[in-house]
Amino acid sequence: MPRSTVARIDLDALRKNYQTALNRAGGAQVMAVVKADGYGHGIGPVASALDSLAPKFAVACIEEAAAIREAGLAQPVVLLQGVHAEADIDECARNRFEPVFHSFQQLSWLERLEARPAFWLKVNSGMNRLGFHPDELAKVMGRLQAMSAEKGLLGFVTHFACADDPDSAMTAQQTSVFEKATSAFPGLMKSVANSAAHFHPDQPMFDWSRPGIMLYGGSPMVGKTGPELGLEPVMSLEAPLISTRMVPAGESVGYGAGWVADRDTRMGMVAIGYGDGYPRHAGTNTPAAINGQRIRLIGRVSMDMLAVDLTNAPDSKEGDTVELWGRTVGVDEVATCAGTISYELMTGITGRVPRQYR
């Protein structure tokens, strides 16, 4: 019989979070971002759950787009990272994938092909990862016209660097740069809004927003948790309590003897570790829960196990289920304790943890 370590996925919560994004999109249409295997939740089940709601999906790369087609879904799929080879453009044309072109190399591939997909152009408004500089847009548009490809252009996208920080002026600056750069092309669509932008009251949302982490209940904002933003947790990471014992005062637990009991302490071992994707850097005092009672981790996380202090759950016993994150303990709380973000925790859960859907 397999161990009962599992990631439970609440698809109804996912749909509610999508509706929250739609309510905050200010009239813009909402493409659901399901890259990185649906942020670790399973791209097929996640996309299928949103099938009746989302008019468009967004992923990073073509293999993720293909997974949506394998799930039987027909919506257009935006490839946020564009294509990585000339042959990919032909596949996009055949499958209604919409690549985001961000380089002159990609335009050179487009020139050599007769079958062309609908596509977007990325504008580098200040994040300086991918995209055409605003001063290059006139040259890009001229090149598209010369190859008679401008009719396939849907519009422009950009990406914000600091939208998670409501006190940063950079989001407004990037929006201004983007608006100015695209103002000469009023008939084309625009997309700027990541999850965080949905929580900026005065942020223009244009034609399409692109929520990602907020769909899964994680917070896109510095200093806020998902529930504080009105988001519902979608993933509940659970594992069984497999042993309990009393650790006498003065004795240690785990590798490196990093935690030493300052009093006699009832300790439990949980069947999950960094081999499952639970963060190794989540140390002593990281919250967990058992039977609705909040408890804490103690000592180092091992590959397959971690230790918890059961003082606050005196009735707990072997076989009980420990929630590592979910409805009692938020994923954003755990991320803060581990010095990371909920994005990394969700996408980091490994394949040996089965996903169960409801």
Image (cartoon, grey):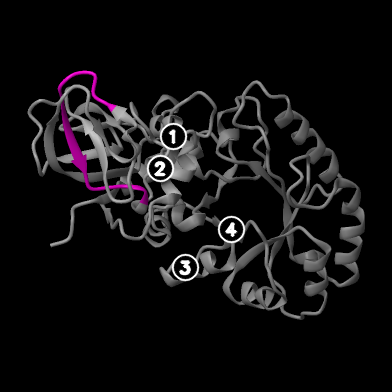
Query: Up-down: is 336 above or below 181?
Result: above
As shown in the figure, which amino acid type bears the numbered disc 4?
Answer: Ala
Disc 1: which residue? 338
Out of 3 and 342, give the one closest to the viewer. 3
Report if the CB atoms under discs 1 and 4 are less than 8 Å apart.
no
With 89 as the anchor, is 258 left or right in this view? left
Asked if disc 2 and disc 1 are in contact, CB closer than 8 Å, the reply is yes
Q: Position of residue 343 (x, y in %)?
A: 48, 43
Residue at (73, 48) in percent of width and height: 129
The answer to which of marks 1 and 3 sits earlier in the sequence is: 3
Q: Residue at x 55, y 29 (%)?
A: 199
Q: Please, what is the three-letter code of the amino acid marked with disc 2?
A: Pro
Q: Is residue 51 left or right of residue 207?
A: left
Disc 3: which residue:
67
Residue of label 4: 60
Task: Tell me if residue 5 comes above or below residue 178 in the rendering.
Answer: below
Over which residues does the magenta segment extend? 260-274
Is the residue marked by circle 3 packed among few (<14), some (14-19), or many (20+) residues within 10 Å?
Answer: some
Instruction: Residue 279: give its label.
Output: 2
Marks 4/3 in contact by CB < 8 Å: the verdict is no
Whichever of callouts 1 and 4 sits on the residue coming sooner in the sequence is: 4
Q: Which is more toward the observer, 103 or 268? A: 268
Residue at 30% across, 37% down: 326
Q: Locate residue 220, reporting x and y percent.
A: 52, 34
In space, the residues marked 1 and 3 are separated at their CA atoms by: 31 Å
From the image, state whether disc 1 or disc 3 is nearer to you: 1
Res 316 quadrant in image: top left
Q: Is residue 124 above or below residue 224?
A: below
Amino acid type at circle 1 is Ala
Q: Point out the residue furthest to the front here.
A: 250
